[in-house]
Image (tube, rainbow, N blue to C red):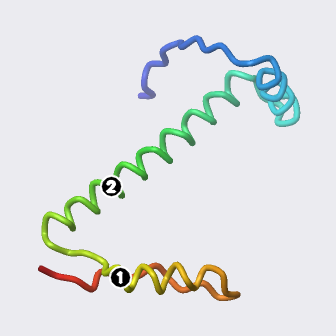
Amino acid sequence: MPARANAVSVSLPEDMSVQVSQIALAKGTTPALVVQEAVVAYLEDQQSRLDAIDEALAEADRGVFVSGEAVSAWLKSWGSGKPAAPPKPDVFS
């Protein structure tokens, strides 16, 4: 059984409201559905961010860290044509 929907009112700047309406028209849906999809995407993104923070804190509590040297080497690779993969933990206390 789907969850019961609650109505939420939000005020958007005029240009954003127009853009939502244009997207809805192009997709053949309603502005409300466009906003709902945007909220779902935002919530998923924020939950992923919070989960990553929780995971990092748990690693820190276990004494698992990435050294400054490994982070520096990784950051230096960003300007190259082939950025390195993010460093893995290399400090275990």
| Residue 6 x/y as whole percent | 48, 15
Say which quarter of the image contains residue 87: bottom left
| Residue 5 x/y as whole percent | 49, 18
Left or right: 47 in relation to 21 = left
Left or right: 35 in relation to 91 = right
> For the N terminus, which image quadrant?
top left
> For the C terminus, which image quadrant?
bottom left
Query: Where does label 2 land, which residue?
Result: 53
Please tell me which residue is depicted at 45% across the width and 28% down the height of the picture: 2
**Front-most of 71 and 29?**
71
**Front-most of 16 and 60?**
60
Q: Earlier in the sequence, mark 1 or mark 2?
A: 2
Q: Three-letter amino acid code at disc 2?
A: Ile
Please tell me which residue is depicted at 15% across the width and 72% down the height of the picture: 63
Residue 80 lies, with reference to residue 29, above or below; the image says below
Say which quarter of the image contains residue 60: bottom left
Decide: few, some or many residues near mark 1? Use Cα within 10 Å; few <14, some 14-19, many ≥20: few
- Labelled disc at residue 88: 1
Where disc 1 sits, the SS reads: loop
What whole-number distance in Å separates the C-alpha atoms at marks 1 and 2?
A: 16 Å
| Disc 1 + disc 2, Cβ < 8 Å | no
Residue 3 lies, with reference to residue 70, above or below; the image says above
